[in-house]
């Protein structure tokens, strides 16, 4: 369906911008627990100030984008675009939507948890430490999916 095609592109772009430019709330939570991991605001990049002013640093906004990304990814895999190959035709946008949605929901969960959260090392490396890589790949996949809609896997 064309609606899920548009929503997939839009949510992948928004999630990519949040993950690349947005503040990492999990690092703040970890730095409260461990003084050696403290990060100054000066060390964070100022290139995303415009996006932070739009409200991308709101945990509620991030949670909503994460849930919507997961929902649209599942719906996109269930209802392929007319003329494309089911499942393979939208594989990368669906995977990026699922990964970005899970990353945003996990970040919300870790930052709002009242007790200490232990994440396994692979989960920590993939979803928390590699958030900027996930953000860039979501944005790139959304761009290429928009530019080349009939390409298999895009």
Image (tube, rainbow, N blue to C red):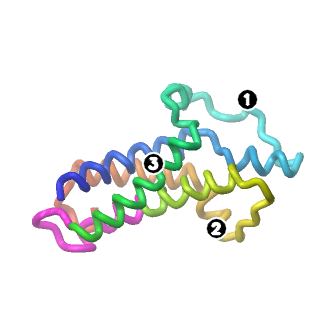
List x then y, in percent, for residue 42. Answer: 73, 29
Image spot of residue 66 (x, y percent): 48, 53
Going from N to C along the chain, the mark reached first, 2 or 3, is 3
Q: Nearer the viewer, residue 99 or 132?
A: 99
- For label 2, the residue is 123
> 102 left or right of 70?
right
> In this orientation, does residue 96 appear?
no
**How far apart in space, not on screen, are marks 2 and 1 (Cα)?**
27 Å
Q: Residue furthest left?
A: 83
Query: In x, y percent, where is residue 40?
Result: 77, 34
Task: Tell me, for residue 65, which label it has, or none.
Answer: 3
- Labelled pair 2, 1 in contact (Cβ < 8 Å): no
Q: Is residue 58 above or below residue 53?
A: below
Could you say which quadrant of the image residue 39 lies in?
A: top right
CA gap between label 1 and label 3 equals 27 Å
- Mark earlier in primary sequence (1, 3): 1
Residue occupying image coordinates x 76% and y 66%:
118
Q: Residues within 10 Å of mark 2 (few under 14, many from 20)?
A: few
Q: Residues within 10 Å of mark 3 (few under 14, many from 20)?
A: many
Left or right: 61 in relation to 123: left
Query: Which residue is painted at 56% across and 49% down in the image?
Result: 132
Which part of the image, by quadrant, shows the C terminus? bottom left
Q: Residue at x 53, y 26 (%)?
A: 53
């Amino acid at each position: 369906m064309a609606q899920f095609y548009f929503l997939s592109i839009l949510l992948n772009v928004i999630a990519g911008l949040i993950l690349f430019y947005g503040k990492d709330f999990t690092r703040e939570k970890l730095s409260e627990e461990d003084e050696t991991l403290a990060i100054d605001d000066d060390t964070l990049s100022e290139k995303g100030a415009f996006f932070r002013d739009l409200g991308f640093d709101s945990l509620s906004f991030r949670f909503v984008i994460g849930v919507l990304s997961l929902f649209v990814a599942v719906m996109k895999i269930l209802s392929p675009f007319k003329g494309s190959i089911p499942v393979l035709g939208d594989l990368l946008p669906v995977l990026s939507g699922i990964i970005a949605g899970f990353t945003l929901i996990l970040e919300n969960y870790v930052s709002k948890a009242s007790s200490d959260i232990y994440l396994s090392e692979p989960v920590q490396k993939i979803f928390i430490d590699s958030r900027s890589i996930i953000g860039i790949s979501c944005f790139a996949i959304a761009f290429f999916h928009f530019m080349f809609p009939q390409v298999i896997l895009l």
